[in-house]
Image (tube, helix red, strand yellow):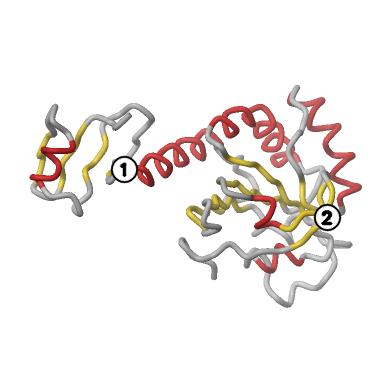
Amino acid sequence: MLRINDEAPDFTAETTHGPIQFHEWIGDGWAVLFSHPKDFTPVCTTELGSMAGLEPEFAKRGVKIIGLSVDPVATHTKWEVDIEETSGFKVNYPMIGDPELKVAKLYNMLAADAGDTAEGRTAAMNAPVRTVFVIGPDKKIKLQLVYPMTTGRNFYEILRVLDSMQLTAAHKVATPANWKNGDDVIITPAVSDEEARQKYPAGFKTIKPYLRTVAQPK
């Protein structure tokens, strides 16, 4: 199984924007890879439209978006027409074609014995291929979320997590439960009280010796 901080497996694949090598495509920034069990499925259609509408928000954070579905690229292109019609947003990010299930297997979304073709497989057979991977500039997996087929993904939550991860990568802080951008943050245990006083001259709040909060750093 892939775990947090494992290197995201590299691969080459055909996409709606042409062939890519995944790590090269990511470059020096962040990336979100979100997968789908089949084209022309109702929940996934709404998700792809939602991501198309939110793409500018991801771009503000230096994050690239890429989708994956275990169907050929030619089918993705036809599906994009439906997505734009139903959501009002054009899909401008690439969609990976995975008709041989290679990427789905590489990312442990399907078992090794799942076969080597998407042909004849139903969405239910591909149900595990509903995962969101957030990958950092170091090409390591920072987050993975797996959703059931009947529950649409909350991409505002992915934006919230990205805000947290980018903030905590730049400062020695963590974010508490239900944190959103602008809320107070937690000073990590690696920072002593003396260092915290120097770092935050306006002060911080000690709730417990191991739980100290401070205004979000700029």
- The picture places residue 195, in percent across and down from the top left corner, at 13, 45
Q: Residue at x 52, y 33 (%)?
A: 156
Instruction: Quadrant for residue 109, please give it.
Output: bottom right
Badge 2 vs badge 1, beta-carbon distance below 8 Å: no
Count of numbered tags: 2
Judging by the rendered image, the residue that carries numbered circle 1 is 171
Disc 1: CA contacts within 10 A as few (<14), some (14-19) or many (>=20): some
Disc 2: CA contacts within 10 A as few (<14), some (14-19) or many (>=20): some
Q: CA distance from mark 2 to mark 1?
A: 38 Å
- The picture places residue 65, in percent across and down from the top left corner, at 65, 42
Task: Give the mark nearest the N terminus, 2 or 1.
Answer: 2
Judging by the rendered image, the residue that carries numbered circle 2 is 14
Instruction: Tell me if 145 is positioned left or right of 87 in this view.
Output: left
Q: Residue at x 71, y 32 (%)?
A: 49
| Dot 1 amino acid type | His
- The picture places residue 114, in percent across and down from the top left corner, at 75, 72
**The disc label shown at residue 114, or none:** none
Q: Secondary structure at mark 2?
A: strand
Q: Nearer the viewer, residue 212 or 85?
A: 212
Q: In this picture, is 47 found above or below 97?
A: above
Quarter the N terminus occupies: bottom right
| Dot 2 amino acid type | Glu
- The picture places residue 205, in percent across and down from the top left corner, at 12, 34
